[in-house]
Structures are given as structure tokens and as C-alpha cells.
Image: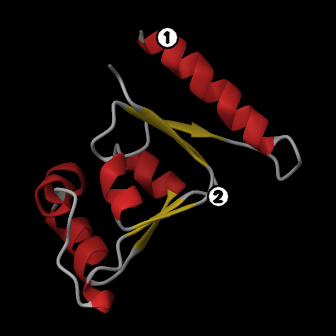
Amino acid sequence: KPIFAAINGPTIGAAATSATLLDGVLANQRATFHTPFASLGLVPEGCSSVIFPKLFGDELANKMLHEGHKMTAQEAHEHGMVNVLVETEPSEGEDTELLNAAITYAEAYV
């Protein structure tokens, strides 16, 4: 069964690394992806030491895993981590816009 995520804010640690393992990721412009393992004295987890270099290349993977680079949604979209970037206006309905985009994406996927 396919697994999707609709991300509308910060993903940190396991949430960011798990996003690379999903069948589809949608995000709005407020989403960020942060893996601060090195600053916490932890080793990278969630297959990130294998998947990040394949997905992002060695340079960006090292920045994320060892230097704590916080990836924006736009950057994640450019590198293939986010399948659909949903532009939303800051308003009460922006979560609804992302949810509707996720439903449309999921229906088209299956």
C-alpha cells in the first residue's frame, strides 16, 4: 500500500529521514527538513546515510547529515524529496489546500 505525507511545517530527525522512504511527499512553502544528528552527538538514522547521498549527492547529503543544513521545501522539491510543492497563501485555509492537493495526488497515484 502506498504511503504519502503532506508536510506543512518543520520535519526534524526521523520525520525528515522517513520522508525519503515514502511513495509521495507533498509540502507547502513552510515545510523544512532538518537532520541535526551531528549537533546532538548522534549518528544519522532512518537509512539517511545511504539514501541522502543517492538522492541529493554527496555534498548536500554531508551538509544535511553533518553540518545541520535545514532544507527548504523548494530545495527538497528541486532535489526530488518532495514530489509536489503546494503554494499556499498564509491564511486559515492553507492546511485545507495542502490536504486537497494530497487527496488529489493519492487518487491519481492509485
Across and down, in percent, residue 86 comes to 63, 38
**Location of residue 37 by image quarter:** bottom left
Q: Spatial distance from mark 1 to mark 2, Cα to Cα?
A: 24 Å
Residue annotated with mark 2: 30
Q: Which residue is mark 1?
A: 108
Of the pair 1 and 80, the residue shown nearer to us: 1
The spot of residue 95 in percent (x, y) is 74, 42
Which residue is at the far front?
1
Which residue corresponds to the image point at 57% horizontal and 57% vertical from the top-left? 31
Q: From the viewer's perspective, is 73 left or right of 12? A: right
Q: Is residue 7 above or below residue 46?
A: above
- Which residue sits furthest left? 50
Q: Mark 1 is on which residue type? A: Ala
Mark 1 burial class by Cα count in 10 Å: few <14, some 14-19, many 20+ = few
Q: Is 68 placed above or below 64 here?
A: below
- Residue at (67% x, 36% y) in the render: 98
Quarter of the image that includes the N terminus? top left
- Measured as percent of width and height from the top left, residue 93 is found at 85, 40
Q: Is residue 105 above or below residue 10?
A: above
Q: Say the numbered circle drawn on residue 9.
A: none
Do the residues bearing badges 1 and 2 touch, measured as CB atoms within 8 Å?
Answer: no
Q: Residue at x 14, y 65 (%)?
A: 58
Which quadrant holds residue 96? top right
**Marks 1 and 2, the one that precedes in the sequence:** 2
Label 1, secondary structure: give it. Answer: helix
Residue farthest along the right direction in this orientation: 92
Q: Residues within 10 Å of mark 2 (few under 14, many from 20)?
A: some
Which structural element holds mark 2? loop
Residue 56 relative to residue 15: left or right: left
Indicate the amino acid at tag 2: Arg
